[in-house]
Image (cartoon, rainbow, N blue to C red):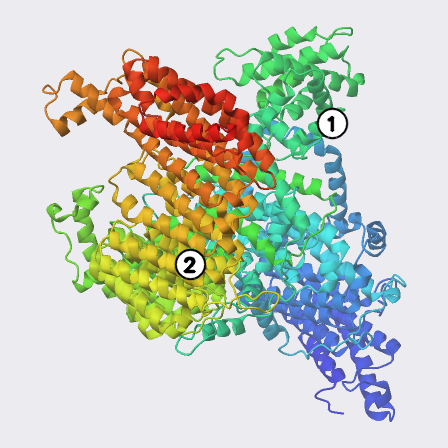
Amino acid sequence: MNNDNNSLVRLNQCLIKIQKDSSRKHVALRKALQDALDHLKALQTYQTEDKNAANRFSSQGVPKDPVELDRVANKIVISLRLACETKTSKLMSTALDCMHKMIDYGFLRGAASDEEAPEKKLMAKVIGIISGCFDFPDDAVQLQIIKALLSAVVSPTCDVHETSLLNAIRTCYNIFLVSRNTVNQNTAKGTLTQMLHTIYQRMELKMSPDIVIGAIDESAIEEQLADRTPTPSKKKDLARQSIDPTDSSPAAMAKRLVAEIATSDKADEDREKREAEEAERMQQEEQVEGDDHNSSESSEIQGDAADEPIKATDLEGSIEVIEDIQSEASSKLIASAAASVAEDAPAPQPDPSVNGDVLDKQEAKKSDSSEGYYVFNDCYLIFRALCKLSMKDLPKDATNESIDMKSKVLSLELLLTILESSGPVFRSCDKFINTAIKKYLIISLLTNGVSSNSKVFKLSLSIFLALISYFKDYVKNEIGVFYSKIFLFILESSNSTLAQKWMVLQVLYQICKNPQALVDIFVNYDCSLDSKDIYGGMVDCLSKITRGSHVMDKGNWTPQEEKLKILALECLVTIMKSLVDWSKELRIEKAVVDPFTLPNKSGQNGQNEDKKEKDEEVEDEYEDVRPGLDPNFAKVKERKEKLQVGIHKFKMSFKKGMRYFIDNDLVQDDPSSIAKFLKETEGLDRVAVGEYLGQKNPPFADSVRRCYLETFDVKGLEIDLAIRRFLGAFRIPGEAQQIDRIMERFADHYFSQNIEVGFGNADAVYILSFAIIMLATDLHSVAIKTKIAKAEWVKQQKSLNEGLKDFDENYLAGIYDRIGSAPLALDDGSFDASGDLSTDPKQRKNRFTKEMERTITKSKQMIKEKQRDKVIYYRAKQIEHVRPMFEVVWPPMIAAFSVLLEEMDTPEVIALCLEGFKYAIRVSCTFHLEVERNAFITALAKFTVLNNLREMKPKNVECIKALIDIARTEANYLQDSWLQILSCVSHLEQLHIVGSGKIQMQTSPEEIPKHTHKRTSSSLFLGGHFEQANATMVADQLDSSIQTSIDRIFTSSTQLNSNEIEHFVKCLCRISREEIESGSAEHKMFSLQKLVELAHFNMDRIRLVWTRIWGVLADHFTKVGCDQNSRLAMYAIDSLRQLAMKFLEKNELSNYQFQKEFLKPFEVIMASNSLVKIRQLVIECLANMVKSRAHNIKSGWKSIFVAFTVAASDHDESIVHLAFHTAEQVIQGHFNLIADPFFNDCVNCLVAYGNNHLFIDTSLKAIKAVVQCADHLAQGRVVELQSDENGKQGFYSDNKQHLALWFPILTGLSGIVSHSHIDVRTAAMKALFNILNLYGDLLNDKFWELLFRGVLLPMFDNVQYASKSEILQEDNEWLTTTCLPALNTLVDLFSNYFGKINFLLNDMLSLLSSCILQDNESLARYGSTCLLLMVMTNGLKFTTEHWTIISTRLSGILKLNLPRDVLEVPSETPLPVPTERALLRSSSQTGSFSEISIEDRRNRMIKNGYRATKGKITVQLSLVETVNEVVFTHYSNLETSHLETLLDALKDSLSFSYTVTRNTTLHSKLQKTGLTELLQRLETQVMSSYLRILFRMYSETVDDADLRRQISESRVIPLCHDFLVEYLKVGIDGPDSATKRIMGYTPIIVQILRGLNDLYDDQFLSHLPKFYNLLCDLMLSHHKDIREVLREILSRIGKMKQIS
């Protein structure tokens, strides 16, 4: 065995060294050393001589026998103890080193007993010996103490636990505090760190997390601790034995400091119990303590660091980044400790009994000796001790180098080390969490988290970060309190130092970098009704800091303040970045290729490659983050937002606010719920609460007051304290009646809970309560100068206790003193965070101290209240949480970014602001938040100053770059926000044009265009200079890459999704319109050119998407094409032509209308633009398309023909001729392309040219082309003809397709018949009837019916319904040259196809009847002629039904055409008085009005007035002749009823004539009108026809001859008799005028006589007696014709009577 490595040899050398260094006076020491050396020597001898030594000794020479090992260890320890007691540096160092070696070599084990005190463990003795050496102030000794204690604690065999462990840690702690040796301090600190690391790692190894998770019986643990640890009294005795209270040395001070903590367990328990009992009273008397109490303790909280002003270097150097704290607290110290401690010691070996395995759960609970149990309690006790050390108050004069300060800092550093190195057992143990952390560590953080000492404050924040990282699941409420009461308070307070704000911002920065932590804060606090909005409040505070709310002198920024502002800005930007990171998975999902997006092509700037690279960079950091939003959180957040709205309403009006709460189910409409709501809801305006409680609304309001009072426990409280508590919850209203209602209910409640106090009744409580309120007003009101004295007030109130003895004077005096010390103030837990912006450091320090004390007290109270609540810390996993998070913070975000971007020019700040804008826009785009997105993009666009008359700075150029970058990265999400981006691009192009010199800027107000009158001349003048300067700036700052990026915006439009491309196009069109309206000549077409490029790039999209895109583009191109600026219009049309040519290269499927929509702008421009050259350009473009792309054109033919149709009405001959020529070429060369779907469009186009009134040749050609189309149609080149059931020749039916093809031709020609030129209308009429005559056989009956009623008859509508219009003038050209021939041609057509269309007889008769009954004589007579022609031509084809129609219609015409107006001539003044207009018209035609006599004018008016009557009489004569012709031509086809109908009509005419002619008065009046002769002629004509028919019927021999003779006899015989009688009477005896008139009837007399003579004999003889005398009288007639007929009659009579 190697002696150099033999432990026995090494120990022997140490003991020998001690023996040599000891003096003779150390007798006991030398004796003990000798004894120990003898034992060692014996072991060495045995080790070298015994053959079985290898089995009895380890490789290092340590005996394996525990008994032998413990005996040797005891001997050595006794000698070493005596050596340490010598207080000799040399001996103590060697002895401690020897102990160190014993521990390292394994001579000391935890189970060994002390031979001097068998009831104790040897290891406890060793630790005590080592710790006892601390009193000796020697650096070497202290270093050996540290090394020995470290070895003992980390040794796997020593088992240092509980008291011994705490003693070891305390010793190292003291050495750090009192040692002035830097090496020793660092070594002690590193040793402590390593000890704690080992202890807590040992706990993680020895215990399973399952053992400690769940409820732990804390009382049992305390009992076990009490059994194994010295009692507090013993601890105090031990402490007194070693600590002199009068000793003021650093070592003594350190001992006292640590001993107080180590011996205070029981005292803490007693204190906590006492605090629990007196908590209420302490809270009530908190305000009574006054300012003196605050000032007395304020200095204890403050540190020296706060007394000194902070410099910029302090912020940069002394305030380190939070991440470095751990390395400072652990890594560095552990390294130094390892260097010192492990210099001579071997590395500790792992415990073979444990082997790193986790203890079984049952084994850990098996017995009190369980190692896991000891380890667990060790960790707990150490953690609690460190917390208490950190909570100890600092003296007023404490400096950074004072022991108290060093102790606090060290304890916090060690706590931080424990937390950061903790494992799953520690992090999940209820004992640690509920007791150690919540009970001690949180309170420590609250105390130190507001410290003015930068190091303490920084460490507190670091510990808080560790809590958030590892324990947030268990300390949710505590974290929330720390956020709201510490962090946000420090940020908002104007009295906190910049260093404090800086460090808080550093912590927030670390939190904000973690998206999970940030979202968790929002979910657990902002989405909780029981918590304040921490996330929203944090952003608000950060935004305020960036905007300078923390600055006292905003006009004079210090470097520190600017750095603080920048750090706050970094936090805001980091928040936005975290939101982006959290939602990037959703972004990836949305980045799936749109099926409507064009595939990527080479040369498109690699945008897809960029996306791919970005996608590959996405980390798996948030694998479990999934889309969607938990509905529970959404509901809670919504409810919380409603609550905030209600709180605001409640403040404005408590009635409306409460109604809002009830309506939104935030509170139930019952007194108890409302009372609880008023008491517990944070944020309610306390003034409004007081007004609500004091309102008069019995009994409901009184019930609310009663329930509200029941929430207060005032049992056992003094009345003034009860009032203070009660009134501290709300602000009492000022109205006396309201106060009375509230205090009356209070008195009743207080009396019911304090009956035994000594009040007589509730009235006594009420009176005294009111007196206390009045006293508070008296003592604390500045308006009352003279205060009431205590004795006087006591005397006044003494006798107010009704029913019992007077109040005790001391009792009342105490009330007076307490009220005098503090007013009855509202205890709302708030304070003015902004404070007084005084620059005095001492005043600010004092204010901050007071604020902190109040904050800490309130925070402790809140934590204590919330510890009873069972809370769950939710780990956010939904991506959709980002939406409400962003909606909450975007207003302060945009405010912060905008303010800094406006005020500051620092590149760092500008970069941060722009980064914030980008992140905010990305979030708003990702979640389609339109308002937010537009707000941020609009704000960013504003900072480009491209739209403003401002000089551009470098930061504005950076904004331009950022905006362009956003357009590239967020292209598929911008929607309407493209408008701002494209507007900036447009203005940027304007600046490029200005910079290139193409635009001469306006240099004087006179050069300003008139359309800019809304802006002042000076502003435009300055604007011109700014624009020139900005152009220079843009040229200098923006390189070619920016122009490339701008171009990529348009070239990459092919990668926009189907919805986004539509938004992009709409916005670009809008910008183009703005350029056209207000831009310069060079700039007007920039966006228009981009639109053309855009159309080219995206034309290959699917038709559905392209249709939507083109719908927008077409509308814009149309408007530009209609612009009066010929350059713009021509560019638009030329662009349309180019696009159309490209588009027409692609074939179009049947039944699609894409080409039509594409070419529609041409037709609109053609119809709307008034410039000839523009319209001519449109026609030329269309003609070129037809020439080059005719075979590709399908649905586009419709738009082409529409445009040609519009051109047909143009006044320019070249346009008309070119358009018609193109249309004509289409018909001749490409008719097969337009045959089916566009035949009608072609026909309509040709008809339009036929209606052209300017160019007759074109109209005539158009008519020929229409006929050509009709020929194509009839020949089946357009559509196949339909065949009947028998398969006969095809025909056209009345189906919609056939009608739709024929009717445009027929109606078009029918319309042209009304053309103003006779050649055109004649050609149209001939073409129309030729087509019908040629192809009429192809039309079925239904078609003919529709044709007649829809085409032919409407040709004469202006005749049928013309009434008194000019069309009925006798000299009307159209009537004479077209209408009458058309009417005749129509009759011929009807006759030709009568067999097919005879069912239209009624329609024809209606047309002819309307013509006959018109006032125009020519038309009427022509109509009569046509009627006669039609009947005579088709009479043999008529059926009985047809003759019935004919006879009825003729009868009606005869009756309606009678000139009955002649019967209405006035009596004495028959002449109508001419109107002034008529007289003037007559005078203008015939001469001067004065030269025409009244008689002449009357005669002229008579002549003009009865012209229509004469015409009617003439027509009536023609009609009578027509009836006569029809009857006697087709007599054999007419039935008796038909004849009778006609006879009735003739009889009516005869009766009318007889009435007029027999009325002598009327006859005389009509003499001068020239009507008498016509009327007499009419009478004669009608009488003749009437008699002729009757006599013909009387001699009838057909089947119904009897009926006809009977009818005839009944009519003709009486008529003939009466007429002869009248003739004889008037002709012989009447006046000359009558005789003259009656003589005109001679032919009628002759006809009557001949008719009688032609009767059959029997008929003649039967009527002869009746006529014989008359015949005899007629012998006297002078008319030869009469006498001749009479001779024949008499001769016949003679023959019949056989008279010769």
Find numbered disc 2 in the image and state the secondary structure of the residue it sits on.
helix
Q: Which residue is nearer to you in this view: 1349 or 149?
A: 1349
**Disc 2 residue type?**
Leu
Residue 1338 x/y as whole percent: 49, 63
Find numbered disc 1 in the image and state the secondary structure of the residue it sits on.
helix
In the image, residue 19 sits, relative to residue 61, either above or below, namely above
In this rendering, does residue 1121 appear at all?
no
947 left or right of 743 in image: left
487 left or right of 371 in image: left
Q: Which residue is nearer to you in this view: 591 or 204?
A: 591
Task: Residue at the far front: name it.
Answer: 1700
Query: Dot 2: few (<14), some (14–19), or many (≥20) neighbours within 10 Å?
Result: some
Query: Which residue in the structure is indicated by mark 2?
Result: 1332
Residue 1013 x/y as whole percent: 20, 42
Q: Which residue is nearer to you in this view: 86 or 1511?
A: 1511
Residue 429 x/y as whole percent: 76, 58
Foreground tag (2 vs 1): 2
Q: Which circle's residue, 2 or 1, is located before the other in the chain?
A: 1
**Disc 1 residue type?**
Ser
Query: Which residue in the structure is indicated by mark 1?
Result: 672
Q: Residue at x 30, y 64 (%)?
A: 1089
Q: Quadrant of residue 651?
A: top right
Residue 727 x/y as whole percent: 63, 23
Q: Determine the CA span between mark 2 and mark 1.
A: 96 Å
Q: Quadrant of residue 815?
A: top right
Q: Residue at x 32, y 28 (%)?
A: 1680
Q: Residue at x 56, y 25 (%)?
A: 653
677 left or right of 598 in image: right
Q: Which residue is nearer to you in this view: 313 or 742?
A: 742
